[in-house]
Image (cartoon, rainbow, N blue to C red):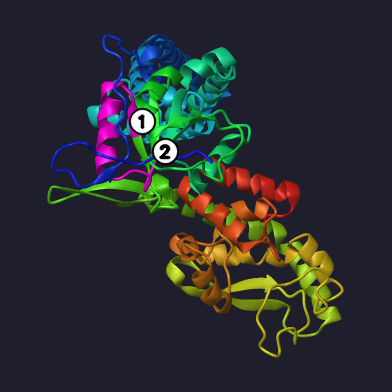
C-alpha cells in the first residue's frame, strides 16, 4: 500500500491539517503544451478543404443525375438549365453545407477519431441543408429557380460521398503516428469504479481521443484496490507538478471527493500555470453524464442533468416517424406469419391467441403489451408474477419455437403504431416487478424517460429473459445517454442477425 503522510501546515493562524503543498516547478523551465486542436492546424485545414471539394463534386454529380440522365423527365418539369447557370447554386450550396458541418464541430480534431460521431454530424447536416437550401433559394428568388428534386439528390449524394471520405480519412488517422498527435494525454488524481468502467469501454476496439498516462495518489491516499494493473501510479500529491511535466500530460482529471476545497483550488491554479486542462469526474452523477449542463441561477453556477438526445423535439419527431413507418411495414410483412402461428396456438390450446400484459412505459404510464400466446391459458392462474425461465413447464409445444424465433413479439408493432412503444428502446417491465426493481437497482426508473422498445441495446447484447438485470439497466442507460439515428439502425440490424433483440 502506498500512502502520503499528512503534515500540519506551517502557515500562521492556520488550524487546518493538510497534505504537503504541491512542489513548485523549477524556474526558467517553461513547459510547452501539446494541444491536439492547436498542434494539428494543418490537418484541420486539410480536412476542411477536403470536405469542401467532396461537397462541391457531390453537388455537381447531383446536377448531372438530375438534368443529364433519365431523371430529367421525372416529376414537375424544370426550366432548361445548363451547368454554367447552376454553378452559382452549387457554390452557394457548398458554402452552406460546409458552414453546417463546421457549426456541428466536424472539423474539431477531437472528433477525427470518433467516426460514429462524425457520421451523425454528416447525416444531420445534410438533412438540415436539404430543407434550408431550398428555403433560402425560394425566399431570395434565385434565378434560375432551384429544383426541389435536385436538393434531395444533392443531400443524398453529399451524404454518401462525405461518409466515404470521412471513413477514408479515419482509416488514415488511426495509424499510430497520427493517433499519438491527436490524443490528449491525461493523468488522474484519484481513481474510482467509474474510471475503471470508462477504461474498460475504451479498450473495446474504438480509438479514444484521450490516453491515460497514469494516476497520482491524492493527499493521504492509498493505492486504490480497483486500479487496473495496466494503469501506472506516477507518484504522490506533493510531486504533482513535476509529474505533470515529466509525463507530458495536457489534461488533468480529478475524481470528486479526493481533494478538499483548498487543494482543489491549488490544483486548478497549477493546471493554469502548466497549460493543462482541468476536469472533474463528479462522483455524485453516476449516470447520464453527457446530459450534465452548467446553468446560471441568478449568478450562481448550478450543475445538473439537463436535456438528453431524445429530449430534443427534432430527434423525437424523427424517431416517431421511423416508428410509424416501421410498424406499418412490419404489420403488413409479418401478417401472414402471425396468422399462421395464431391458428397453430388455437389448435393446440383453444382460447384467446393474443396475450395482453400490463407493462410500464414512458414516464411510468402503464399500457397493455400484445403478444402471441406461447403458454397455457392458466400459466399465471395463482397470480404469481415472475420471469420466464428456460424450458418453462407452462409453455405450449409450439411455444418453444415461437419464443426461440421471437414470433410472439410481432404483434407489438401495433403497440408501436399506437405510440405506446418504439421500435428501439429499453425493455418494458411489469409494474409488479418494477416496485422491487426501483428500490434495489439504482437509477432503474431513469429508463422510463423514453418509450420502451420492441428491441433494444441490452437485448441485442444477449441480456434478455432470465439475465442480470443490473447489467441490462447499464446498457439501457448507455443507450439513453448516447442515442443517435445510427445506433437505432445498428440495433435493428443486430436484431435480425442474431435473433436476440426482441424483448
Residue 280: x percent and y percent?
A: 36, 40
Quadrant for the C terminus in the image: bottom right
470 is higher (above) or lower (below) than 249: below
Q: Quadrant of residue 455?
A: bottom right
Labelled pair 1, 2 in contact (Cβ < 8 Å): yes
Q: Position of residue 224 (x, y in %)?
A: 52, 44
Q: Is residue 68 visible?
A: no
Residue at numbered disc 1: 238
Q: In the rendered structure, which disc, 1 or 2, sits on the residue that comes first in sequence? A: 2
* Quadrant of image for the N terminus: top right
Residue 170 lies, in percent from the top left, at 55, 21
Kindly identify the residue that appears in the image at 61 percent across and 34 percent down. Answer: 203
Q: CA distance from mark 1 to mark 2?
A: 9 Å
Q: Quadrant of residue 335?
A: bottom right
Is 168 positioned to the left or the right of 295 in the image?
A: right
Foreground of the two, 61 or 221: 221
Q: Can I make out residue 491 in this image?
A: yes
Q: Is residue 10 above or below residue 320?
A: above
The residue beneath circle 2 is 4
- The span shown in magenta is 255-278
Instruction: Give the camera-side residue of 210 and 123.
Output: 210
Helix, strand, or loop for circle 2? loop
Amino acid at each position: 500500500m502506498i500512502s502520503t503522510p499528512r503534515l500540519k501546515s506551517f502557515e500562521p493562524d492556520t488550524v487546518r491539517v493538510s497534505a504537503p503543498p504541491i512542489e513548485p516547478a523549477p524556474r526558467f523551465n517553461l513547459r510547452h503544451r501539446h494541444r491536439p486542436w492547436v498542434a494539428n492546424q494543418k490537418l484541420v485545414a486539410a480536412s476542411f478543404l477536403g470536405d469542401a471539394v467532396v461537397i462541391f463534386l457531390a453537388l455537381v454529380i447531383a446536377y448531372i443525375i438530375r438534368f443529364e440522365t433519365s431523371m430529367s423527365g421525372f416529376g414537375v418539369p424544370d426550366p432548361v438549365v445548363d451547368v454554367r447557370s447552376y454553378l452559382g447554386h452549387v457554390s452557394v450550396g457548398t458554402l452552406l453545407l460546409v458552414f453546417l458541418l463546421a457549426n456541428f464541430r466536424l472539423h474539431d480534431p477531437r472528433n477525427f477519431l470518433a467516426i460514429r460521431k462524425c457520421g451523425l454530424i454528416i447525416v444531420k447536416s445534410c438533412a438540415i441543408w436539404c430543407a434550408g437550401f431550398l428555403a433560402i433559394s425560394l425566399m431570395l428568388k434565385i434565378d434560375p429557380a432551384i429544383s426541389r428534386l435536385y436538393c434531395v439528390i444533392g443531400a443524398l449524394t453529399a451524404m454518401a460521398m462525405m461518409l466515404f471520405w470521412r471513413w477514408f480519412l479515419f482509416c488514415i488517422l488511426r495509424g499510430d503516428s497520427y493517433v499519438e498527435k491527436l490524443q490528449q494525454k491525461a493523468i488522474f488524481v484519484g481513481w474510482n469504479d467509474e474510471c475503471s468502467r470508462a477504461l474498460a469501454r475504451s479498450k473495446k476496439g474504438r480509438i479514444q481521443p484521450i490516453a491515460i498516462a497514469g494516476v497520482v495518489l491524492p493527499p493521504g491516499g492509498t493505492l486504490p484496490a480497483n486500479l487496473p494493473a495496466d494503469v501506472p501510479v506516477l507518484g504522490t500529491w506533493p510531486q504533482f507538478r513535476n509529474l505533470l511535466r515529466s509525463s507530458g500530460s495536457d489534461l488533468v482529471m480529478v475524481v470528486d471527493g479526493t481533494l478538499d476545497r483548498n487543494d482543489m483550488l491549488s490544483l486548478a491554479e497549477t493546471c493554469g500555470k502548466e497549460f493543462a486542462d482541468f476536469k472533474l469526474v463528479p462522483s455524485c452523477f453516476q449516470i447520464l453524464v453527457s446530459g450534465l449542463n452548467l446553468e446560471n441561477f441568478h449568478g450562481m453556477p448550478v450543475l445538473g442533468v439537463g436535456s438528453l438526445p431524445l429530449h430534443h423535439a427534432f430527434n423525437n419527431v424523427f424517431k416517431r416517424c421511423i416508428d410509424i413507418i416501421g410498424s406499418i411495414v412490419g404489420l403488413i410483412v409479418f401478417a401472414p406469419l402471425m396468422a399462421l402461428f395464431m391458428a397453430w396456438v388455437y389448435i393446440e390450446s383453444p382460447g384467446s391467441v393474443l396475450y395482453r400484459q400490463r407493462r410500464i412505459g414512458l414516464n411510468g404510464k402503464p399500457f397493455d403489451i400484445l403478444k402471441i400466446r406461447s403458454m397455457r391459458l392458466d400459466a399465471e392462474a395463482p397470480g404469481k408474477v415472475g420471469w420466464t425461465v428456460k424450458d418453462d413447464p407452462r409453455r405450449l409445444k409450439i411455444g418453444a419455437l415461437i419464443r426461440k424465433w421471437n414470433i410472439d413479439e410481432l404483434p407489438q408493432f401495433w403497440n408501436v403504431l399506437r405510440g405506446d412503444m418504439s421500435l428501439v428502446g429499453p425493455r418494458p417491465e411489469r409494474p409488479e416487478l418494477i416496485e422491487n426493481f426501483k428500490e434495489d437497482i439504482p437509477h432503474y426508473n431513469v429508463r422510463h424517460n423514453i418509450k420502451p422498445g420492441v428491441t433494444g441495446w441490452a437485448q441485442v447484447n444477449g441480456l434478455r429473459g432470465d439475465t442480470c438485470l443490473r447489467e441490462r439497466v447499464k446498457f439501457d442507460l448507455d443507450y439513453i445517454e448516447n442515442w443517435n439515428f445510427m445506433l437505432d439502425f445498428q440495433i435493428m440490424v443486430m436484431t435480425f442477425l442474431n435473433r436476440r433483440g426482441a424483448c
